[in-house]
Each structure stands twice: as structure tokens, then as C-alpha cells.
Amino acid sequence: MSELLQFLFSGLTVGAVYALVALGFTIIYNASDVVNFAQGEFVMLGGMITWFAYQAGLPLPLAALVAILATAALGVTLNKLAIEPARGAPVVSLIIITIGASVFIQGAAQQVFDKQIHSFPAFSGDTPLRVLEATIQPQSLWVIGGALVVFVGLWLFFTRTLIGRAVLATSNNRLAAQLVGINTNFVMTLSFALSAGIGALAGVLATPITLTAYNVGIGFALKGFAGAMLGGMGNPKGALVGGFLIGLIEALTAGYLSSTYKEAVAFVVILLVLFFMPQGLFGSKSTERV
Amino acid sequence: MPRLSAKSATLLVLAALVVVSPLFFPSGYYYRVGALIFVNGLAVTGIVILTGYAGQISLGHAGFAGIGGYACALAPVHLGLPPALAAVLGVLISGALAYLVGRPILRLKGYYLAVATLGFGILVSMVLNNERQLTGGPDGIIVPDLGLRGLLKDWGLNISNGEFWYFFCGIALLIGAWIALNLRQSPTGRALRALHGSEIAAQTVGIDVARLKLQAFVISAVYASVAGSLLALQNKFITPDVAGFMHSIEMVTMAVLGGAGSVLGAILGAGVLTLLPQVLTVFAEFEQLVLGLVMMLMMIFLREGLLPSLLRKLRGRDE
């Protein structure tokens, strides 16, 4: 029993990271119909930039802030330089652009930073908290809390603010949004900044537990996507639930089956979802406009 | 002057390249480089069928190359198959897996194939790295000799190992290109290109879109598998790198650089990106940077790829 609880805790922790990545996917997907394969690199950059800023002598909170802002700026740059010029391109071209961006950012991180594995101290110490018969790291609570706060924040943003509703309107119908005076280019910029910032935040929160290196991004992208798909592509609630579920399945697989092949979970889930419920848990059936 | 069909012209150019290039080789080492280009060209021809014709993308094709390669390493030892039959076994396994993975996915939007193949590639490379007892793990494993060169020697044709693999892979590439070009002009190929243009339009004229995409995916997996087998047999050694994510990315980049819609263009892309690390030794350090940049730049500025854009420009001047 305590064993199961322990696995659940670790599942919720990584699941929170996947949920944040899935939310990042969802924001960009909704605003532009683009699946941004570089989403995982934002997580990597969040961790790596924080580590280097921290090494350079900045206090940890400031280093984290620098990392999040820098990554958000990079997200905006990616949109301006690579996504916007290819507007209207076939899906395959957009996939190649974003996967190319992902590979490029990895290559750049190798040069600008290094190829080592890094970590920085947990925010509230390393003394595990006892919960029932299991223990949980304080940092896990930061990660899980972070995912929930971001989700609620996004929900408020999209339902209660004018700009947030403009984003929703754009994702519903770009042309109609333009006609009522919404600056859709600004909406795109905002979506990429938000999505990259959230990815970086996930990297900042998770690095004390999961460690970071230049090449961790693609794994996060795969799992975050699996989460977003399980929940129903484009649905924020689905992204949150899907991300947590992927984390839980992965942790249980690692605990009871094989820790090596826990990495296969995301792939198997993607296949099963596609086989049995392509709309995901919360998705609505979509039709394609001609 | 009677005009050559594009198909014959492509095949002629390729055959001429295979035969004439050795005249300019400064050393025997270039036979090996040439053979590598042909192997990569073969794999990329598969990408042409998938991406150029059918408009789908795979980010895990190296997984199939890995299966083809390790089939040649493992089947002779564990099943007693001769290496050539082992390669055929690799093709069967790759094709079957592509069918199983592709069937549910190809009904949906393009993203799903990209993600699922990404996961598939990572999975294959993970199995190859972790099942040490079977695959030798990250250190790789020895691959038995194909034995064909010995056979040729018995028949009185004595050529060096480098020359043998150069021409063997060159012939394989020619056959692969011939099949791909024939496919392009067949009803299947026309239907594939129709669905590339618009899936919905293709559907309304009665094309079974999902089935066709699946066919293209399976065929391209077979190409990757054969290329993996050729690489393994040629090197007499194979490591899990052949199935790695970066190898998949290399294949896609080669195709989009030269032109994913053109067999000759894609092979040109394979040639450039295979030669580059041989000429520039620092390339290895910056490989990811360069590949990522090439992918983005080509898709933004020259979506058709180098060769088709160049040809279009030349034709424009003629008229």
C-alpha cells in the first residue's frame, strides 16, 4: 500500500510537468493549429538557463525569472522568424519547421551551454515530508502546485480578460476575429510567449528532481503531446488531466513492470488512444473545413 | 529532338553518376563515401514516397533502418539464416510494424503520424540499447559477411571490398529509384499525389485516402529497412545509433534539402549531407545546429527543395 502511494506521488510529480508541457501545446495549437514540436525545448531551456544564471551568481528566484523571460522571448522569436513566414503552409512543412527548431535549439544549447547534466537546489530543502505511509519531496509539491496554479491562471485569463477572450475568438475563427478588430498577429505573439514561458516554468520547477541537459526536451515534447492527446487535443482541461495520467501510468509502469521501459508508455498510450478514442477523453469530434 | 521522359532522364543521370564518379576518385576511400551516399539515397527515396508523394511525415524512420540492420546481425546467428535472407526478414518485420503502427494513425491529421513515429523510433532505439544480451547494447554488434564478393571471386571477378559495396549499393539505389519513379506514374502514385494536394478532394473522387497513406508508409519503411541492412552488411558492424532520433532527422533533412518531391533531388540532398561531414571535420560538432537550420530555412524559403527550384528557374529562362 505504501509502495503504491509512493509510486502515485512520483507519478503526480512528473505528471505535473507533462501537464504543463501539454498546456503549452494546447495554447499554440488553439491559436494557430500548429503543433509546436519545439515545446519540449522550452522546458530544457527553463532548466538550463536557470542553472547557468544561478552559477553566474544570481539568486535562484531571479535566475528562474531570467530563464522564463528569456525563453518566452525565444518563443516569440520562433513565431516571428519561422512560423509566421510559413503561414498557410501544408501541415508537413509546419511539422518540419518546428521539429527543425527543436533540433536547432538543442544544437545551440550544446554550444552555448554544454553537454553535462545539471541541477540546482530544491526551493524548500530536501527533507522529505511524510504523508500517510509514504514520503514526498517538498519540490514535488512545488511542481504539482505550479501546474494547478498555471491551469487556474490560464482559465481566468481565457474567460475573464478581454485579451484572453480575443485569443479564444482567434482560435475559433481567425478571419471572424480579424473582422471584429482583433489583432490576430498579437494573439499569436502572446500565445507563443505564454506557451514558452509555461514550458520554461515547468523546467525551472522540475529540474531539482528530474535534472536537465541539452537533450531532455524531445522526451518532454513526446510525453506532453501524449498527455494533450489523451485529454483531447486543444482542450486545456484535457491537457491537465492527460498530463497527470501519463505521469501516473509511467510511474506505475516503472514501479511494477520495468523502469527502463517506462519511456515506452507515452508511445503505447498514443497508439491506444488513436485506436480506441481518437478524440481523447474530453475532446469533441472535429470536422475539417474545406 | 525527342524528349526523354522525366523517369528515364532521372535513371540515366543516376546510372551515369554511379559509373562515371569513380573516374574522379582521388583515393579508394571515396568508394566508401560513395557507397554511403547510395545507402542514404535509398533511405531518402523512401522518404520521397512518404513525404513527397503522400504528404505525410515520419520522425522515426531510423527505427526501420535499425530493424533492417539488426536483422542482418541477429538472424544469421540465432536463426541460422544467410545474411541476404536476414535482410528480407528485416523487410518483413519493418513492413509489418509499419502496417500495425500506421493503420490507426493514418486516418487522422498529419501531426499524429509525426508524433507516433517519433515515439516508435525512440522505442526501437531504446530496445537496441537496453537488451544487451541480444543486441550487444550501445557498443554494437558484429554483422556476418554477405558472401557475395567471395562468390564473384569464384566466378573470376576480383574487385576490392570498397568497389564491391560501391557498385552493389549503387545498383540497389538504381532499383529503388526505378521503383519509386514507376510508382509515381502508376494510378497509385497519381492518387497519392492527389491526396497530397487535398485529402478531401481526393476522397470525393473516390480515393481510399487512409489505405493509400498506409501503403506509402509501409513502402517507405521497407526502403529504410533495406538501407539499414546494406549499411550493416557493408560495415560488418552495427550500433544502435542507426536507429537513433538524429538519424531519422538526417533522413528528413536530406529529403527536404534536395527536394522531397523529386527522387533525384532527394538523392542530391543525401549526397550533400553525407559528403559534408567527410569534407568538414568540425561538422560533427555542429551537426544538430546545421540540420535544424536547414530544415527551417528550406521550409520557409525553398519549400520544393534545391533541385526542383533550380530546374524551375532553368526552365523559366528557356521559355
Image (tube, coloured by chain):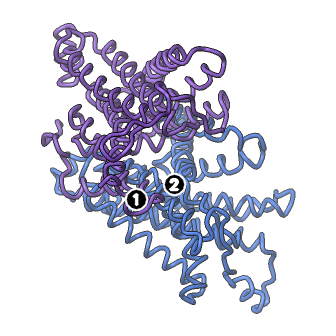
Q: Could you tell me which chain the residue with mark 2 belongs to?
A: B
Q: Is residue A282 visible?
A: yes
How packed is label 1: few (under 14 Cα within 10 Å), some, or many (20 or more)? many
Residue B112 spot, x, y in % from top left: 32, 48
The chain assigned the colour blue in the figure is: B
Residue A274 in the image: x percent, y percent? 25, 54
Q: Check if mark 2's residue and mark 1's residue have beta carbons within 8 Å.
A: yes
Residue at point 46% right, 62% down? B180
Mark 1 sits on what residue? B184
Describe the element under mark 2 as helix, strand or loop: helix
In the image, which disc is placed on residue B263?
Answer: 2
Which chain does purple denote in the image? A
On the rendered structure, is A11 left or right of A42? left
Residue drawn at (46%, 67%) of the image: B222
Give x and y (percent) for residue A124: 46, 25
User: Residue A235: percent from the left, percent from the top?
Assistant: 21, 34
Q: Residue at x 51, y 42 (%)?
A: B308
Q: Which residue sits furthest right?
A: B26
Q: Is residue A249 above or below residue A241?
A: below
